[in-house]
Amino acid sequence: MTTIAIAVPMRGRLNGLRLGEYLLLAFFGLVMGLPILFLLAGSFNVAAPGKEAVLGIANWVRAFTDPGTLNALWMSFLISITHLIPGMLLSIVMAWLIARTDMPGGNLIEFLCWFAYFVPDFPLVLAWILLLDPNFGALNTVAGALAFIEAPLFNPYSFWGIVWVHLSTGGVWFKVMLLTPVFRRLGASLEEAARVSGADAFTTLRRVTIPLLMPMVLAISALSFIRGLESFNTELLLGSPVGIYVYATKIYDYTRHEPSAFGEATALGSVFLFVLVILSYFYRRHLRGKRFTVVTGQGYSTLHVKLGKWRYAAFGGCLLYVVVMMALPLAFLLLGSVMRRYGFFSFKAPFTLAHWQNLFADPLFLVSFKNSLIIAVATAVGSIAIYSTVGYLLASRKARHSAWLEMLCWLPWVVPGILMSLGLLWVFLATPARALLYGSVWGIALALIIKESPVCTQAFKAAFLQLGTDLEEAARVSGASWSYMFRKILLPLVAPIAATVGLLSFGGALTSVGTPVLLYSAQSRPLAILLMEYSFTGEVERAAALGLFMTVAVSVMMLIGRKIGLKLVGA
Amino acid sequence: MAEPVLKFSEVTKRFGDYAAVNGVSFELQPGEFFTLLGPSGCGKSTTLRLAAGLESPDEGEILLNGVPIASPKRGLFVPPDKRRMGMVFQSYAIWPHMTVFENVAFPLRVRGEAAASMRKKVGDALEIVGLTGFEQRGATELSGGQQQRVALARALVYTPTLLLLDEPLSNLDAKLREQMRTELHALQQRLKLTVLYVTHDQTEAMTLSDRIAVVRQGTLEQIGSPVEIYERPATPFVGNFLGRTVTLDGKVRKRGGATEIEIAEQTFRLDENRGDGFAEGAAVRVLSRPEDIEILPPEQSAVNSLKGRVTAVAYLGERFEYTVNVGGYSLLLAASKRQRYAVGAEVCVALDPNHLMLLPLGS
């Protein structure tokens, strides 16, 4: 009767998985739910942080009688929508050219967009300052040399300056990356059926292609719009100096007040949270019905539109956009970092490596570099460990409360980094976690791990779903315990995804400004914050050097990651 | 009778409110090839997964060699890795990051088998499935048929008490499927394996099985040998699922000791005792296999035949297929090439009274 000896009570067996699930739910509840509750509660607390709480609505009154607050909210919407529209149109055209026409070099353009997406935005904003600053901006200098132009021609410290820079940082690249596969997957047969039914190319585009793409285009627009609302870096560098505030920089501004106005910050954050929750509710509801209509087509499209002579013009246009929006600013970042005094070409020896030497000799740089490495490694390891488990639970349908788990994982996607940090800051201050997490690298790493949640969870979930359950069950029936199976079967098979998730989190942790900006202290300052400080204190050249250093570091990592990922997938 | 290898008694498995497996009971004798046959979604795969321990039952009891391995009422469940079963998945589930050798060696490795005997056993298993020399191949470099063999070798390598096969042939092309079916049958006979087999393909079920259980909506409709199931289906579902049936509705007429069935003002006589249990005038449905109905010239009419008219003829190469109208019912019947009838010809169709199924028609 040996079989009985190895039989386990039914409830006990299920408890292993259940326990993991409840631990994760508790963890997410603590680090995601609690900050938001604290944020809401904090907005009604009129006492200073750390003092005995006093209930009141004074924060809300003050936040909303300050004309700057409503203005900041309005500005967030305005900026987000203004760069969304041209960005979306450009992305659709580029994705269509890459996927559905005979434009040469489509793969190159697609790769460049992929690469540009990973270039961190803070250094890019800095580069645009080097190009467009009214006093020393290179383009203004060039324009000023032309007699008929009243200098300065460009001013980045303006609404349109911010919109322009947004088109360079992220916006278009991200959308092209998402849209190109959609255009590719759109079943050729759907279009061919329209052609055979007697529709000409234009009618097919109008009656079949566009309606089929519309749900996806709307979904990506909504996603971009919400991401646009949480933008912080560009507005901090370009808006704050001239009094243009979006709500994220406004919150940052409140926390910098002397005495600090945390109450107002939390009130503003709460309002925004409310707006975002409504928006994302409609977004998800919209998605639910239509998500699958686009990608049901079978097989890749072979129907390429012939552009004739225009295909070279199309390629030239795409390349020009990439050069102007990405290569040009990066080139000036390099130039800025090696000039004795940026913009002064008339010096006897205008070029020097002194800024690089100074940067690497700066003790602040060394400490920040170490901090950044610790934070990035902790974020990458933490993200892989936590989100592989969450992804497994969600994909295997073994979670009893998967809806809650999924909802909590989506939360940081809706809640902007700075708001999450504000809530976390509140939690760190008011709970025993203070000793370990307040102002420490671990607190920053935790915030960054939370920030990565939606992307990482989806990546792992998709990977596990794709694997299916057979490989896992085959190992179990073959006699492997769950943990042996997990180590020998699942982990090696999701290694490419784990590597990708690790690199993405690492890169994100290295370059994020909005998340650590409220959480760092002198001991835990990361490189990105150092970059911000250099920019504010007018050390343009050293900032350029640091910005370029970070850009190169992230780019090299992403290229290596792409190579590893492809190799692992190919093997 | 020997102790059954596997015994299901009143096993139920629900997903939400839906009972995928509903009070299922059956036994597998040692060396028996037992097939669960049914349409997709009928619960046959869930039944297999219950046996493997990949699902846990909500009610009932599952015993392996007389020892309970899953019993909710006792709060007992043996996890799949402790059941010593071998399983071949429909997708084969060959681990793509391992070689053929590593795949087949996996069940031995988890049991801490020594390297030398592991090589020997893997070699033997690969020889059985005809893959000697493929040890170092990557699993992804194999064709579908080869993957299938690897999966089989992996399931056999540690001589499991029970072999579970979940539609193992359904992903192969027709020719290969036939070949693998023959090989599987020979293998099972040679190694005296006890097999629980799941399929929706009646040919596989008929040719491989000692016994078949026809599954419908989570319940077993009928258990029996292939001959029993085919010749004497217990329900219309079983009859229709295995091969075609011809259906005629009529009324029971008692003539002295004999029973006749009246269909559209014609009658044919049943064998003795066949009509017992049916009252005079009762509405009945008559089911027959089309191959049990013979088309004869009208002058050969007999007590067991009905008159009809040919309405369509199709030439299928090896035979003719006639559509015969009998009292408003269209019967699609095959006939050998020796008989030739034109469209419109009067014929008579002779039913085989031994292979008829009579069902009372609902009131």
Image (cartoon, rainbow, N blue to C red):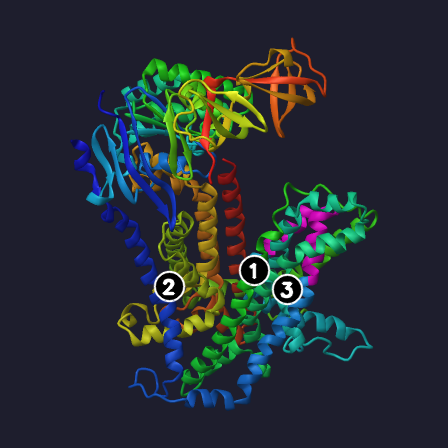
Q: Are marks 1 and 2 on the same chain?
A: yes
Mark 3, Cα crowd under 10 Å, few <14 / some 14-19 / many 20+, is many
Residues at circles 1 and 2 in contact by the CB criterion of under 8 Å:
no
Q: Which residue type does callout 2 highlight?
A: Leu
Mark 1, Cα crowd under 10 Å, few <14 / some 14-19 / many 20+, is some
Q: Nearer the viewer, mark 1 or mark 2?
A: 1
Disc 1 chain ID: A
Quadrant for residue B151, please give it.
Answer: top left
Q: Is residue B28 left or right of residue B153?
A: left
Front position in the image: A124 or A345: A124
Query: What segment carries the magenta color?
Result: A89-116
Q: Earlier in the sequence, mark 3 or mark 1?
A: 3
Q: What residue sits right under mark 2 in the picture?
A: A446
The residues tagged by marks 1 and 2 sit, at their Cα atoms, a distance apart of 30 Å
Q: Is residue A288 left or right of residue B133?
A: right
Q: Is residue A563 magenta?
A: no
Quick one: SS at disc 1?
helix
Q: Nearer the viewer, mark 3 or mark 1?
A: 1
Q: What residue sits right under mark 3 in the picture?
A: A168
Please tell me whether residue A392 is drawn above or below residue A543 in the rendered image.
above
The residues tagged by marks 3 and 2 sit, at their Cα atoms, a distance apart of 29 Å
Question: What residue is at 76 percent from the left and 72 percent from the top?
Answer: A143
Q: Position of residue B352 (x, y in %)?
A: 50, 17
Q: What residue sits right under mark 1 in the picture?
A: A287
What secondary structure is the stretch in magenta mostly built from?
helix
Q: Position of residue A524 (x, y in %)?
A: 37, 68
Q: Position of residue B351 (x, y in %)?
A: 53, 19
Q: Which residue type does callout 3 highlight?
A: Ser
Quick one: SS at disc 2?
helix
